[in-house]
Image (cartoon, rainbow, N blue to C red):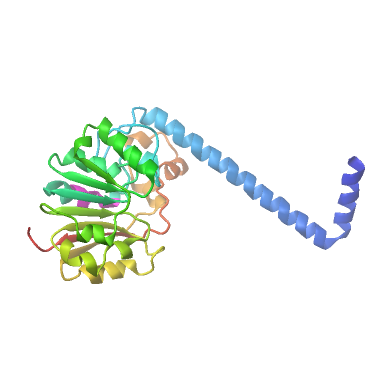
Amino acid sequence: MKKLVKKLAEITARNPASWAVLNHSVIKFSLFVDYYHWKQFRKNLLNSALETTIPDLTVRHGPFAGVQYPSSQAVGSALFPKLLGSYETELHPIICGTVLKTDYSEVIDVGCAEGYYAVGLLTRHPNTIVHAFDTEPRALEMCRKMAEINRVSDRLRLGAMCTAETLAEFPFTGKALIMSDCEGYEKELFTDKNRSTLKEHDLLVEVHDGHAPNVSDYLKDLFRSTHQIHSIEPISDHKKAIIYQYPELSSFSFDERKILLAEHRTNCTGWLFLQSQFNR
């Protein structure tokens, strides 16, 4: 075996092309090892932070402080920012200033994931029915469990697919809020088919121009005549680690806070809050 290795080394040393291939492979393997170690460090940090700062899985801050998670899992997003209450802080002025002060008859949450908004809004709106949609069965099951543990399951309705027709034909009983986080499906969800139906309702839409180019402009044009348009820009994960001051983070370094607060927004270009100009 040693002779074989020595022979291969001699051949490689005499052949520049072979050396280039070997060198490239070593670099790639080194990068893989570094990435693996970083993933392990990140996983260990997140687990440790949860155990030491939020062991009871209860949201600490923000508009949904006090909401209980049934398990240490989230669907399609980072768990720690949700439990800390820093998740989508950009929306807190809209949530606290308008959404929580409006008596919505229904909330439709398209892309509800494990129920952060669906259940959170149920705990704040005692007379509201929330219709939560997600195409992932695991998300719906987790949303159901979260509603149960927070004792609001009697006002939660679950569904798999919400389409433009679903919204056009929905039997609204009063002023409603439609929330959407559906990774580029916005153009298919909001169309001329339901624009007139939605003119009396508020919409909070996470826009993904990275998935659906120019979807932000599309939505603005679609609802310009019926809604006041508020654009909300995302805050970078780097900036969050600088400006977010939560007592739970006081013992962590800057680099650790970047990992803990990260929401990993790549294709999200922000949000649109479309506020109806009509009174129902």
Task: Find the magenta span and give its range.
Answer: 90-96
Report the front residue among 32 and 170.
170
Magenta stretch secondary structure, dominant: helix
- Residue 113 is situated, as x and y percent measured from the top left of the image, at 34, 45
Side of 98 where 261 appears, left or right: right
Determine the residue positioned at 14% across, 54% down: 172
Side of 208 where 2 appears, left or right: right
- Residue 92 is situated, as x and y percent measured from the top left of the image, at 24, 48
Q: Does the image show residue 100?
A: yes
Determine the residue positioned at 75% across, 55% down: 23
Q: Is residue 153 above or below residue 217?
A: above
Determine the residue positioned at 32% across, 35% down: 247
Which quadrant of the figure contains the N terminus?
Answer: top right
Q: Which quadrant of the figure has residue 163?
A: bottom left
Q: Does the image show residue 59?
A: no
- Residue 156 is situated, as x and y percent measured from the top left of the image, at 22, 41
Side of 192 where 259 appears, left or right: right
Determine the residue positioned at 27% across, 47% down: 132
Q: Is residue 17 found inside the magenta-colored segment of the image?
A: no
Which quadrant of the figure contains the C terminus?
Answer: bottom left
- Residue 176 is situated, as x and y percent measured from the top left of the image, at 16, 53
Q: Which quadrant of the figure has residue 164?
A: bottom left
Q: Which quadrant of the figure has residue 3?
A: top right
